[in-house]
Amino acid sequence: TKCWLVLGSEFLYNERLNRKYRSFNAVYEDIDFRDGDIIDVLEDSASESIIDNNTHTYTLDLMGHTVSNTQPIKNSGTLTVRDSIGGGILQGVNPTSSTPAIDNTGTLNVQAGTIVGTYNAINNNGTLNQTGGTVKVSGEKSNAAIYSKGGSVEVTNATVTAENDTSTSHT
């Protein structure tokens, strides 16, 4: 099942249901939203809203586009990030706070694409499986590409980097 997403206009479209949404939360609250749905990003976009995945299992396909969030994707369900086209970026862009691109307390599977943060790219207190793509942190106040206070982290065939890192990595 596919959903299409344009965050800049806060427009989501679920083809299976033929329904339009203004936010991720509206999709999750739809009684007909099903685990296993795929959300495709159709254009480069920016979002200020928190994307909160409470219990759902879904895939976010960056499709070669850049999604810039000033608030993190909060995942306590199962989220798979992929990039079926290449060059896709999911970035947390709040340089005045420690906001990551993804705040994970569930299961996060990174298969492809690039996840970037200015302090931490991913805060992990759940299960993180990175089997492809890049997770990196870049900025004067950068801390760790993956900051894991608990849970587990497994990285295979992937890249984790810190640029302008001013502290010890916490991966």
Image (tube, rainbow, N blue to C red):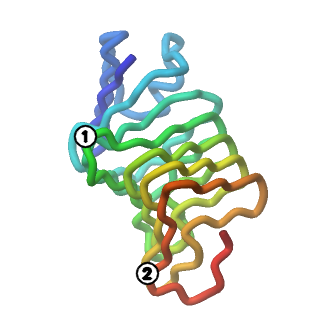
**Residue 86: percent from left, percent from top:** 27, 48
Query: Which amino acid type is shown beneath numbered disc 1?
Result: Ser
Element type where label 2 sits in the image: loop
The disc placed on residue 164 is none
Estimate the x, y position of residue 133 in percent, counting from the top left.
42, 54
- The disc at residue 139 is 2
The residue where tag 1 is placed is: 9
Could you say which is closer to the camera, residue 152 or residue 76? 152
- Left or right: residue 64 versus residue 156 is left
Residue shown at the point (55%, 40%) measured from the top left: 52
Report if the CB atoms under discs 2 and 1 are less than 8 Å apart. no
Q: Position of residue 121 (x, y in %)?
A: 51, 64
Q: Quadrant of the C terminus?
A: bottom right
**Which of pointers 2 and 1 lies earlier in the amino acid sequence?**
1
Residue ranking furthest to the right: 150
Which label lies toward us, 2 or 1? 2
- Judge the density around disc 1: few (<14), some (14-19), many (≥20) Cα neighbours within 10 Å: few
Q: Residue at x 40, y 34 (%)?
A: 23
Q: Amino acid at mark 2?
A: Gly
